[in-house]
Image (tube, rainbow, N blue to C red):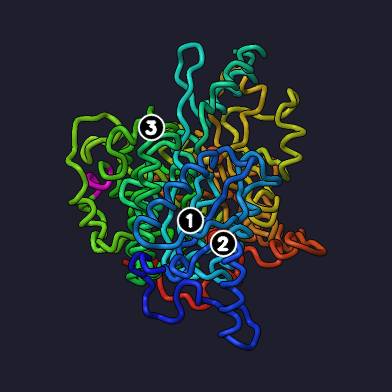
Amino acid sequence: MSNEPKKTLPSNPESGLRKGLTSYGDKGFSLFLRKAFIKGAGYTNSALDRPVIGIINTGSAYNPCHGNMPALIEAVKRGVMLSGGLAMEFPTISIHESFAAPTSMYLRNLMSMDTEEMLRAQPMDAVVMIGGCDKTVPAQMMGAASAGLPAIQLITGSMLTGSHRNERVGACTDCRRYWGKFRAGEIDEQQKDEVNDQLVASVGTCSVMGTASTMACIAEALGMTVPGGASPPAVTADRVRIAEETGTLAVQMARDGLTIDKILTADAFENAMRVLLAIGGSTNGIVHLAAIAGRMGLEIDLDALDKMGDETPVLLDLKPSGDHYMENFHDAGGMATLLRELKPLLKLNALTVTGRTLGEEINAAPPSFPQDVVRKFDDPIYPRGSIVVLRGNLAPGGAIIKQSAADEKLMEHEGRAVVFENAEDLVTRIDSLDLDVTADDILVLKNIGPKGAPGMPEAGYIPIPLKLAQAGVKDIVRISDGRMSGTAFGTIVLHVTPESAIGGPLAHVRNGDRIRLSVKNREISLLISDEELAKRMKDNPITEPTADRGYKKLFLDTVTQADKGVDFDFLRAAKMVGKTPQK
Ligand code: FES
């Protein structure tokens, strides 16, 4: 055709549709065949000669957090095509928190493998990854980190808040709060059903600082999104504009060869950790960051992260640590407002998907204005970082507690262990009025770690025993090797490593043992002698869980502990090259 627009294909013969040819023993034939098939969909040679931008579609009827996928894909395609690229949409696995059994975390690594291998197998010069619900964004970044091509993250965006009897509500902090009221007999069946209609007022991800919002902010802090890409709610014009800009940038990244290894550096991870602490982010953020960093050959230094907490206050006033919702964060200027406050602590030279540094993007952001969602650095909602790393004979490999969501009075506490052997034991006995438990005790839940459950479910938020809840007890110290939803609140020690299912000390805690939690001293200790602990370990050897076949076998044979991100060992970088943050 004589009036075809100027072709924009890079001269590299290994680019665009020519990349990763299917093996037929004849490259010319492979390309000929590929083009013949795609022409069956009506493409012209001009279209096929352009930079190819893959767009990952994670829309699914099972995933309402991604319910705006069609609008986002259309906008990404617009951005790609206006910039001279060829948009190629394709599906991968999609995971929703409430529709994945036994737990979404069990499937995160499978989604990361799907993502990685589809990025390798199919020809594309850059990829736009659209994710939002908790595990999807980490899975996509893990996969892209391993695949190594230019990649940009597009977040689906948060849901709107609803209104129940004139009270503003949103998932999922308010889901737990209202369920707690129902359990305690404070609301009846009718009110429970009414609020159920209002907690999720639109498509999009949870509206508080849960894991999805945490990973959205982390993705922007890592430099993996368009500036401002973390906060626009799912159903807004701002979100759609971000999608178009994402498509535009993807073409630029393809042309410039801006591969993901130039973005996901040790400095970028340090910025992400800083942001995680300052937003009062979900504890799951640490596990996911460890997994993504592990793909780049970087270990997360938990002790250094803990030290960062001493100098990083919580600035974001969002539930569950504060009062607001994600849409308020967006109205307050989103990440630009937060990053401006954190600027003196950030690695400003870290490169972002725009090709500019984080420091340049902060300087280019619109000016600040009065708002009450992101506090000033010297007027925080919590003076220290939200997450603390604990160690001791109960967790030689570390454990964490979200101090900003914990009860100040319980953070220095010694108590008697009330032990539940596994999640089933917990369900069977926690509401028994015969349970021997007081508010001063410490609830211990075993076997909900990476191998134990399996998949490290968010069961670490152990409910207050019914008899204590009815007596008005709102918090009690709880310890497990599992995870907790970022939307939950309480004095809850999580991620105890090594987990009980592989014989960690947690496996050998007995009813009546004394346990000491000291957040001040970063300590979680079982108050028995070393000799007694060694004897218990010798007398009660643990048989690790196994499976005969399938994904469960792969999972149980290869999953790593929380400090390595619960990734599969063979998916981490072949060689570790350093730690982050760097000292
Ligand atoms: Fe999808 Fe909360 S359930 S983000």
In this view of the protein, can residue 459 be seen by the observer?
Answer: no
**Can you identify the residue that label 1 sits on?**
129
User: At which x and y percent is residue 415?
Assistant: 57, 37
Disc 2 + disc 1, Cβ < 8 Å: yes
Identify residue type, mark 2. Answer: Thr
Is 562 part of what is drawn in magenta? no
For marks 3 and 1, give the CA distance. Answer: 22 Å
For marks 2 and 1, give the CA distance. Answer: 9 Å
Is 341 part of what is drawn in magenta? yes
Left of 7 or right of it: where is 343?
left
Relative to 465, does residue 296 appear above or below in the rendering?
Answer: below
**Can you identify the residue that label 2 sits on?**
115
Which comes sooner in the sequence, label 3 or label 1? 1
Left of 512 or right of it: where is 214?
left
Which comes sooner in the sequence, label 2 or label 1? 2
Relative to 246, does residue 293 appear above or below in the rendering?
Answer: below
